[in-house]
Amino acid sequence: MYKFLAILSLICASLALCGGLFASENSQKPENAEYAAVGPTGVFVDGKPFRLLSGEVHYFRIFPEYWKDSLEKLRACGLNTVSTYCPWNAHEPRRGEFDFSGILNLKEFLKTAQDLGLKVMLRPGPYICSEWDFGGLPWWLNNIDNIRLRSMNPQYMEAVRSYMKRILKEAEPYFCNNGGPIIAIQLENGYASYGNDANYIEALREMVLDSGFKGILYTSDGDSDTRIHATSAKGVWRTLMTGTKLADGIEIMNKSQPGMPQMISEYWVGQGLRLGKPMYKRDHEAMSKELDSVLAGGAHICCYMFHGGTNFGFMSGALRATPLPLPYTPFVSSYDVDALLSEAGDTTPKYDAFRKVFLKYNPDAAKYDVPANSEKRAYGEIKFTEAASMADNIENLSAKKVESPTTLTMEEMGHPYGFIHYRTRMSPQSFPMPVKIDGLRDRAWISMNGENLGVFTQNDKNTECVISIPPEGAEIDILVENMGRVNFGLTIVDNKKGITGGLILNKNQQYQNGWTINSLPLNSLEGIKWNKAEKSIAYPAFFRGELKIDEPGHTYIKVNGTRGYIWINGFLLGRYDKLSPIATTYIPARLLKSGGNTIEILELESMNKLSAESTDKAEKIWREN
């Protein structure tokens, strides 16, 4: 009897929540239902009840040539909607300079979704988290005096208004009220995990409304009771982020937001990948059963991620404990994250298990065939025949050189990513003198007259070494690597890179003054002076080789080194690292060409063999969970 009543109660709750397929078309429709709207009677699109079955795909992590394949697989999985972030820092790399070309062509991505009959949930930020550098906030915000992030601070809001106006203008032709696929726009992202400025969310709401959008406005928070109970702006749908115990989260949302449909706008089906952390493989069959349960209860859902893709270039973020002290832990360049599609866009067992569930609630999608996975190629060994020490090429790689009485951060140099180099001349001392790097972000190599003194990271409690300066004085060099800005938590306010303090002499006695500083963005390696590759080279060092192929295909590269960066035909793929849970670097076929392909790496520590291997399989380090 109790079991029957529980089932009956579940069915009634489902009908009351109007979970898309269960809604009556005669239900009272909320305002703007002719476009897209949500209210006590459910979600409506084009005047009809609509079940949001969504998957997250980021256009900026996948080359445009593969957008259609990913979205076709999404549609064939039984989903009807694609959700995507917009990275402010990529679209506005310098203040007032916007980029919507190539992999950032938002309009083309939206058009692709529309052509496939998919709806879109747009998430323009301004903050997106997403294990992306600075959570999508542009680096240059750090140079604005008196700025306070993610609040109604005037300096911050001036920059936000400019960005939101531009990104929404780009999206406007694809608003649902303009005949397009965008039915929902998210305001901010996980804001309850950072602040509680209700006026800030209201201001973002007004920006979206001023753009002319007449669809659903929503926020996403979770996955704790405190965050779920966060307040929101009037007329804004509150949705949930969570990875486990989905029903518990829905129950709390029903209490916190009664009489409304509930949505898990981020169902974390995988994990972010950090250095030193293995990939955790969850039981996809158990996950699919839990998914089925909440969908049977009428919930709307979005799988984060459906297709992860890659953090190309220097765009992977990092975490740092709150409050300080550290540790600081960078994310890796791969955004495979155990999603339904692999980094290369291949379907997985999780895809197959979830597809069976989604087709129960969207059976019409069964008419779509699942596109075949791409062929992978193993091209064999790549020998590095040329090499160049980084120390010998500072001037050749420098994008900007300044003389300064003090150390400057990368931001103060107008230099967002890559490396920065500091050089100073020290006077002789009568005793071995300790010197300490104060405010290191994130890894530094320090040398005297070309001889290595040590390597430090911001996680080291002691960034000090003792030097004996000869009678003629000595030249001190410090090379600093930016390993990614913090993307989540309160420590995003401390996100400048390089040396944020200075070089302190003799146990906090004085700062060293008089510096020559070079910014090394590594956008191009054309200035390097190459020599014959020798294993005895001083690291960090660049290596170059050639990959000859008959026909381009997707492949994976494994470097016989420790940690560094890899370029293919001048394009920076990202970081490789012995501490990464993925030992191979994915190379999309579109980056290769028939004939000779130039492979360049920057190895930061050591090579056990001056070569790399092209393989047809990704090598992952899994841990069952």
Image (tube, rainbow, N blue to C red):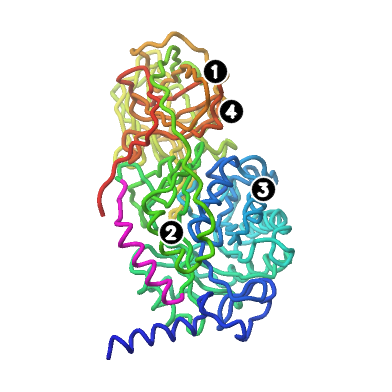
Say whether disc 4 or disc 3 marks the residue closer to the N-terminus.
3
Where residue 194 sits in the image (x, y, percent)? Answer: 46, 63
Is 289 a magenta residue?
yes
Q: Nearer the viewer, mark 1 or mark 4?
A: 1
Residue 136 visible in image? no
Residue 592 appearing in the image = yes
| Mark 2: secondary structure | helix
Q: Which residues are magenta?
A: 279-298
In three-dimensional space, the C-alpha distance between marks 4 and 2, rounded to whole angstroms, equals: 57 Å
Using the image as rendered, state which of residue 527 and residue 83 is in the foreground: 83
Amino acid type of disc 3? Answer: Glu
Q: Position of residue 574 (x, y in %)?
A: 47, 35
The residue lying at 33 percent from left, 57 percent from top is 284
Q: Which residue is mark 3?
A: 108
Could you classify mark 2 by the number of other residues whose Cα lies within 10 Å: few (under 14), some (14-19), or many (20 or more)? many
Residue 355: assigned label: 2
